[in-house]
């Protein structure tokens, strides 16, 4: 099983490396409260391959992962301190139509120093073979001249590991104003991210990772909208879009939300 995962990983690495000649112009950023860049998640023109980075207050790169939305997925979910600094990064990667998976949980101090890093993968998980009970041979009640049969060998069974499903939330700015959208986790208030959208622009705001199923991100996140320009007193509202959820791969689905102005 380790060999199979290694082969899949090498193939994805080769395809990813051959695609990285393209510039990553489609970017989403978060910022420190002082305006300095805290994280970036950028993709190529086809929105297939990308790169995620996190920075400390000096602008130095403290974390970097490759991203992809093709042949499965590789994604990063950041959470933050109140000043906008990265607190935790959850990296997830899995091939399309495969049971192999890999996850990394990285925690940071407020100054950007890595304080903890935990790695998990399919091969090192809690076993790929289900436990079984050995069948013991019981002698017949009477003796015979027939040779004693050999004990039965138990047949091992295998269980498939849960596949990670990604439920992305996308924002569509239907207004003529540039706005900032903030997503705050309902139960972990320090886990938030912000996204700036130009008029009529749409972009991915984040994602929810679940085992074996998709789920509406609005069940886990609260969304708020404000104008980029401080003097703009326009009020906005964010509603589920008329655009239906779109399944872009076996393990990825997009949920859309419209940003509208209140007249």
Image (spheres, rainbow, N blue to C red):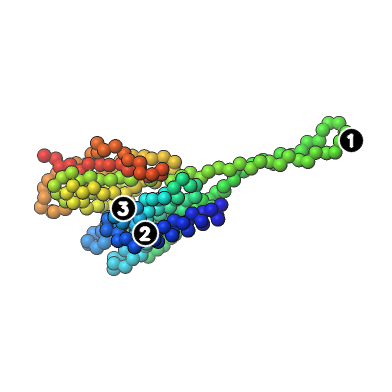
Query: Which residue is the site of mark 2?
Result: 19
Q: Which residue ends up furthest to the top in the rendered image? A: 142
**Is there any visible trace of residue 60 in the rendered image?**
yes
Q: Where is residue 229 in the image (x, y as percent from the top left)?
A: 13, 54
**Which residue is at the front of the view, 134 or 3?**
3
- Check disc 1 and report the residue beneath it: 145
**In front: 42, or 21?**
21
Q: Do the residues labelled 1 and 2 touch (CB within 8 Å)?
A: no
Q: How crowded is mark 2: few (under 14 residues within 10 Å), some or many (20 or more)?
A: some
Tell me if mark 1 has few (under 14), some (14-19) or many (20+) residues whose alpha carbon lies within 10 angstroms of its own.
few
The kind of secondary structure element at disc 2 is helix
Residue at the spot 41% in from the left edge and 50% down from the top edge: 71
Q: In which quarter of the image is residue 32?
A: bottom left
Q: Which badge, 1 or 3, comes first in the chain's sequence?
A: 3
Q: Reading the chain from its start, which is encountered first: label 1 or label 2?
A: 2
Question: Against 199, is 13 above or below?
Answer: below
Q: How crowded is mark 3: few (under 14 residues within 10 Å), some or many (20 or more)?
A: few
- Mark 3 highlights which residue? 46
Q: In this view, does 88 lie to the left or right of 143?
A: left
Q: Is residue 208 left or right of residue 158?
A: left
Distance from Cα at disc 1 to Cα at disc 2: 72 Å
Ranked by sequence position, the earlier of labels 3 and 2 is 2
Residue projecting furthest to the right:
145
Residue depicted at 57% across the width and 47% down the height:
128
254 up-or-down from 48: above or below: above
Between 116 and 215, the residue placed more toward the observer is 215
How many circles with numbers are drawn on the protein? 3
């Amino acid at each position: 099983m380790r060999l199979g995962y290694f082969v899949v990983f090498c193939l994805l690495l080769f395809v990813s490396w051959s695609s990285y000649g393209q510039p990553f112009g489609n970017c989403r950023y978060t910022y420190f409260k002082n305006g300095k860049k805290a994280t970036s998640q950028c993709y190529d023109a086809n929105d297939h391959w990308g790169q995620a980075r996190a920075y400390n207050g000096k602008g130095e790169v403290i974390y970097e992962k490759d991203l992809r939305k093709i042949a499965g997925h590789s994604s990063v979910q950041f959470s933050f301190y109140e000043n906008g600094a990265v607190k935790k990064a959850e990296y997830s990667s899995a091939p399309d139509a495969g049971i192999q998976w890999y996850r990394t949980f990285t925690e940071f101090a407020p100054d950007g120093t890595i304080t903890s890093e935990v790695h998990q993968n399919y091969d090192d998980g809690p076993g790929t073979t289900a436990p079984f009970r050995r069948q013991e041979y019981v002698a017949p009640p009477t003796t015979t001249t027939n040779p004693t049969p050999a004990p039965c060998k138990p047949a091992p069974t295998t269980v498939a590991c849960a596949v990670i499903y990604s439920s992305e939330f996308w924002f569509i700015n239907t207004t003529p104003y540039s706005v900032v959208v903030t997503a705050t986790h309902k139960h972990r208030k320090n886990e938030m991210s912000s996204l700036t959208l130009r008029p009529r622009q749409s972009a991915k705001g984040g994602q929810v990772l679940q085992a074996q199923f998709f789920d509406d991100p609005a069940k886990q996140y609260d969304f708020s909208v404000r104008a980029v320009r401080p003097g703009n007193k326009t009020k906005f509202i964010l509603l589920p879009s008329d655009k239906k959820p779109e399944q872009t791969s076996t393990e990825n689905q997009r949920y859309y939300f419209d940003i509208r102005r209140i007249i």
